[in-house]
Every structure is written in structure tokens, then in C-alpha cells.
Amino acid sequence: MGHDQVAVLDGGWSGWLAASYPVTEVVSVAKPRPFVPQIQPDWVVDMETVKSCKDQAGVALVDSREGERYRGEREPIDPIAGHIPGAINYPWQDVTDAQGYFRSIAEQQQRWAALESTQEILVYCGSGVTACVNLLSLKAVGIHTGKLYAGSWSDWCSYLT
């Protein structure tokens, strides 16, 4: 929606607790404020765009799911296992360490080094949610060519029957 005042809790809730930050059981009362969406249509792509671009030079198609799902060994959600032809696997879980903390910028840069000069990176997962972790990682290291295929594998495989 283009909201630019956002933050990500590094380490998540367990990280917050481990750092002994304050917690409360008091429920806060939200203060309504106007919000005007700033839709960013150039941040997302649809299936037709993926089909027409995925095999072009300068375009990388990134599957963000764990390796087992990418390889088609396990599929807990969709009726068909596998990945979009031509996709490369960068599991979203590799953006953080075992405790859920964002890996260092140097580690993130190393992770994406092979795609650094790619003109466009189309990122997907199972349903368009966890791919956003990879998009956050790309942005953090200064790679701003990533776009989300929001329909992801769930959309793609629904046409394979």
C-alpha cells in the first residue's frame, strides 16, 4: 500500500523477550489516523509478466520456498509440487540466522552477489508472503530491482491441471 513508516522487529518476539525489553498485558487503544494508500503497481507482477519475462536475459526468477518444496519433494499446501521452470532457489529462511535475527549486510550481499547486476528479479514463494523476506533482504543490500509475483506457486500451479 506504499506505507513508508514501517519497521521489522529483528529477532521477532522471542528476540525482544531475550533482550529483556519491557512487555505489558495492558491493551493499547489505537488512535485512528488518516492513511492515503500510495499504491506501487511496479512492485508486483502477475503470471503473464512472469511467463513473458522469466527466460529473458537480465531477468532472474527466484523461488523463496525451502529447498524441499522447490525440488518438489514435499508440498504441504498446493495440489502440485515443484517450481516454475527456470526459477532458482533462494530460501527465505536463509535471510535470518537460527535465532531469527537478520544476517549481517555483508552476509546478505554475499548471498545475492550472483544476482547483483541482474536487471530485474521476480520473486515468489507459495502464496506471496514469505517472498517478501527475500525482497526485504534485496532492498537492505541496495538491490532495488526485485518485484513480487504475488500469486506465486499457488497461482502458477493452479493452471497446470
Image: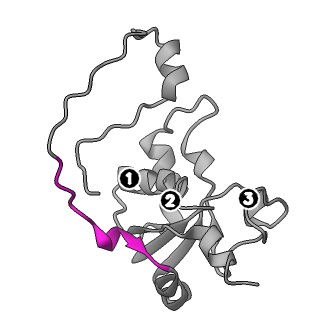
Residue where numbered disc 1 is placed = 141
Q: How busy is the neighbourhood of tag 1: few (under 14 within 10 Å), some, or many (20 plus)?
A: some
Query: Could you tell me which quadrant the N terminus lies in?
Result: bottom left
Amino acid at dot 2? Trp
Q: Residue tagged by mark 2?
A: 112
Mark 2–mark 3 distance (CA, rounded to whole Å): 28 Å
Q: Earlier in the sequence, mark 3 or mark 1?
A: 3
Q: Residue at x 53, y 13 (%)?
A: 18
Residue corresponding to mark 3: 77
Range of magenta residues: 35-46
- Image marks 2 and 3: residues in contact by CB distance under 8 Å: no
- Res 118 visible: no
Marks 3 and 1: CB-CB under 8 Å? no
Amino acid on which the number 3 mark rests in the picture = Ile
- Asked whether residue 65 is in view, the answer is yes
Q: Amino acid at mark 1?
A: Val
Image point 78% across, 69% down: which residue? 79
Residue 63, image x, y percentages: 61, 66
* Position of the C terminus by quadrant: bottom right
Q: Position of residue 47 (x, y in %)?
A: 52, 81
How packed is label 2: few (under 14 Cα within 10 Å), some, or many (20 or more)? some
